Amino acid sequence: MGLSPVISNARQRKWYVLASTLLTAVGLLTIGAAVMAFAPLGAAVVLLICVACLGIADGGTSIAEQSMMGRALAEEDRSAVAFTVTAIAGVTTIGIVLALHYLQEAETPLAAHVTMIWVAAWLLCLDMVLVALVREPADASLAGDTVSHRDGSGGFVQRIRRGMALAARVSWFRRFVVARIL
């Protein structure tokens, strides 16, 4: 991706995460509006354009997050934190979808999906606020502040605990991880 050198050399990477999250939210809202407003063929064209935007946003977010992790964690510990964030976010997502499913049993499937899109957009807005509040250090390198916490691999719960312990060691990064779980 052409933005990789720009993001990696930036003093504050959280702004790239914010921009990518905003693009994701706009893409989701556009999909929801298109499904309700256009004929199926028009909605399909809008969907394809929005999916391309979502892919670009996801790539930008991934580059910025990996760069931020590189500033806070030793290389061998990044996968543990990424695993923890993904596991907790996945469980949270499943919980939200199940709650919405039971709250929307009387709605049509299309209306239920559009409601889920709106909930996702609102959660992305909350995520953007939380990411904006992170006080990421402006230093290009935090080699002295990176942490390494090797205690071997284990089961699912042990890996999540290890990832949480790693993320909790650096205060600004801890807030960033909590925001990204959303």
Image: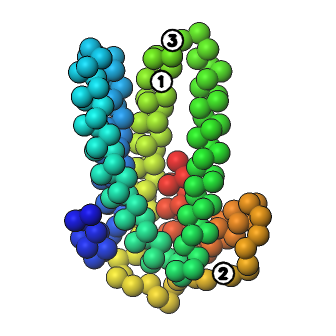
**Residue corresponding to mark 3:** 108
Q: Depth-wise, is mark 3 or mark 2 nearer the camera?
A: 3
Q: Earlier in the sequence, mark 3 or mark 1?
A: 3
Return the x and y of residue 12 as percentages of the image width and height. 33, 69
Q: In the image, is residue 86 above or below residue 50?
A: below
Disc 1 crowd rating (10 Å Cα; few below 14, some 14-19, many 20+) is some
Q: Is residue 80 visible?
A: yes
Per the image, label 3 sits on a secondary structure element best described as loop
Per the image, label 2 sits on a secondary structure element best described as loop
The coloring applied to the image is rainbow
- Residue at 55% x, 52% y: name it: 181
Return the x and y of residue 83 as percentages of the image width and height. 60, 62
* Callout 3 amino acid: Thr
**Residue corresponding to mark 2:** 149
Q: In the image, is residue 79 above or below residue 114?
A: below
Return the x and y of residue 127 as percentages of the image width and height. 45, 48
Q: Which image quadrant is residue 151 in? A: bottom right
**Left or right: where does residue 77 sit relative to residue 165?**
left
Per the image, label 1 sits on a secondary structure element best described as helix
Q: Earlier in the sequence, mark 3 or mark 2?
A: 3
- Residue at 46% x, 53% y: name it: 130
Mark 3 → mark 2, Cα distance in angstroms: 49 Å
* Callout 1 amino acid: His
Label 1–label 2 contact, CB within 8 A? no
Q: Earlier in the sequence, mark 1 or mark 2?
A: 1
The N terminus, quarter of image? bottom left
Disc 3 crowd rating (10 Å Cα; few below 14, some 14-19, many 20+) is few
Mark 3 → mark 1, Cα distance in angstroms: 9 Å
Q: Which image quadrant is residue 15 in? A: bottom left
**Residue corresponding to mark 1:** 113
